[in-house]
Image (cartoon, coloured by chain):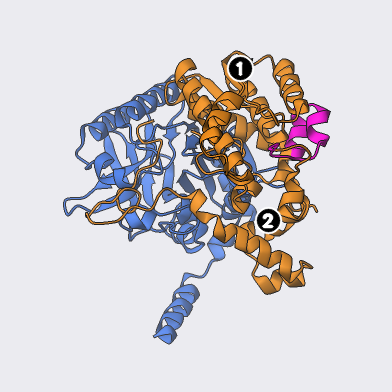
Amino acid sequence: MDFTVALAQIKPKLGCLDDNMALIEAAIEKGISEGAHLVVFPELALTGYFLKDLVPDVAIGLDAPQIARLKLLSQRISIAIGLVEVTADYRFFNTALYLEGGEILQVHRKVYLPTYGLFDEQRYLARGEHFRAFDTRFGRVGMLICEDMWHLSAPYILAMDGATTLICLSSSPGRGISGAEGLGSADAWQKLTSTTAMFLNCRVLYCNRVGYEDGINFWGGSEVIAPSGEVAARGSLLEEDFVLARVEEGALRRERIFSPMMRDENLAITVKELKRIDRERG
Amino acid sequence: MGTLTVNTALLRKILVGFVHDEVTKVGVRKGVLGLSGGIDSALVAYIAAEALGPENVYAYTMPYRTSNPESEAHAKLVADALGINYQVLEITPMVDAYFALVPEADNMRRGNKMARERMTILYDHSAAVGGLVLGTSNKTELLLGYGTLHGDMASALNPIGDIYKSQVWELSEAMGVPREVIDKKPSADLWAGQTDEQELGFSYRDADELLYRMVDQRMNRDELIAAGFAPEFIDNVHKKVQGSHFKRRLPVIAKVSNRTIDRDFRYARDWGK
């Protein structure tokens, strides 16, 4: 179906659940009043990003009151949002929830926790173990959290699992200033979102946050990418924004007729070769 | 060159946004800085005026009796051009009173004392006006350790600490820092005729080209030699970076508990902001 997506390019406050919840609810209401059917938030929208030892303090269970409120709101608009989840065995996950019709339809726990350069996620967070597509009113969807998307296998698995829409929630720090027009990290992401859409004949809905944490900026630039790889909408760089874009079923249908790579993708060969590699690695 | 060239429009946006965000999120609107008459503090004044509004920027020139009068004139030029709050506060009486007690002190001790005297004045004015002290050390100085610990290196936040001197020049051009300030030779202005490059023994341009490859690109010694840098120059700069590392870290704390500050008690400074 055709639908309108809103990318809430917000600026969360570090470790302030109540403030961020207010920000999130305001964006959801805005999405509803602007006629959006789906609103996408950044990674860790509820908590902020460089949490370090704050992780246990800001983590919530899936039965938390904040999530009950989001469930209620999801009766009026579908929601994809990032937060820190604590499980009954006290593991803490960088989690993305997809809520629709008053229910949580999917819990994606970030698999690839970057722990290099300025990142230190694996020190504080447990690693997710699944990439699973799921059915929504917009068709089959797959969710990724930031670094997940930098691993080719992740969007590939989701697309092979039938996803035609990839939602990526991100808190990407801006870095790599040079003589070029764009910021290094923004340029790299823009190549990635577009190429991923093109390779997998999927739409990509990418929501990145803005603001600064301890001098580190988040560059925003949230995007809706058509299955052709073309940019359908892009949020402003480094500033809060609310990107509204119409997503047309026809564009997906036409791209899948024009470039039927996913139809021809051979799962059996891929599985066979990966098994061989696994075997040979011992 | 080339590698150090920056998109000044984008860099300006990030640094102005940084000052605005990091100052206002702690609940204040003002910034305080020492304006030496040199390019680094001039650039920070330009960034701060754009981020906070000139009426919220408080700049102080703090000359000693041996300071070059041209420095004060250049500082005033910058303050007037921006319309920021500006005051001159002589440090001669306090510094001379102290060195009357220790007359044997050499130039280095005198220079450090002056830098720390200025720091105490800035922090006092930070409390007086209710603003944060803005740092004015660039990446080249910070890496070479060419600054006084707890003196000019002290600040609440530093917008230019991740850009090299060459990039300071480039951004200053783009932001309209007065020509006289851009063109003059960098100097700590501790005595007449002193220049940074003379004291360091190499030019900032050369140091930047080397540091960029050594630090940002992580080229090893062999790769740097192959890129055309003299081994003695590489070793000299490397020694300065390593030897001054203590200046870039918090004091070392003896660990005895399970949660030691900064070791396993880790929070962002923007915790709750």
Quick one: which chain is orange? B
Pinpoint the chain carrying mark 2. B
In magenta segment, residue A152: no
Q: How many marks?
A: 2
Residue linked to disc 2: B212
Please identify which colour was used for chain A in the image: blue
Percent x, y for residue A173? Answer: 52, 45
Query: In the image, are marks 2 and 1 on the same chain?
Result: yes
Pinpoint the chain carrying mark 1. B
Q: What's drawn in magenta, residue-wise?
A: B169-190
On screen, residue B157 above or below B20: below
Dot 2 falls on a residue whose secondary structure is helix
On screen, residue A197 above or below B190: below
Dot 1 falls on a residue whose secondary structure is loop
The structure residue drawn at horizontal position 64% and vertical position 44%, both measured from the top left corner, is B107
Q: Quadrant of the C terminus of chain B?
A: top left
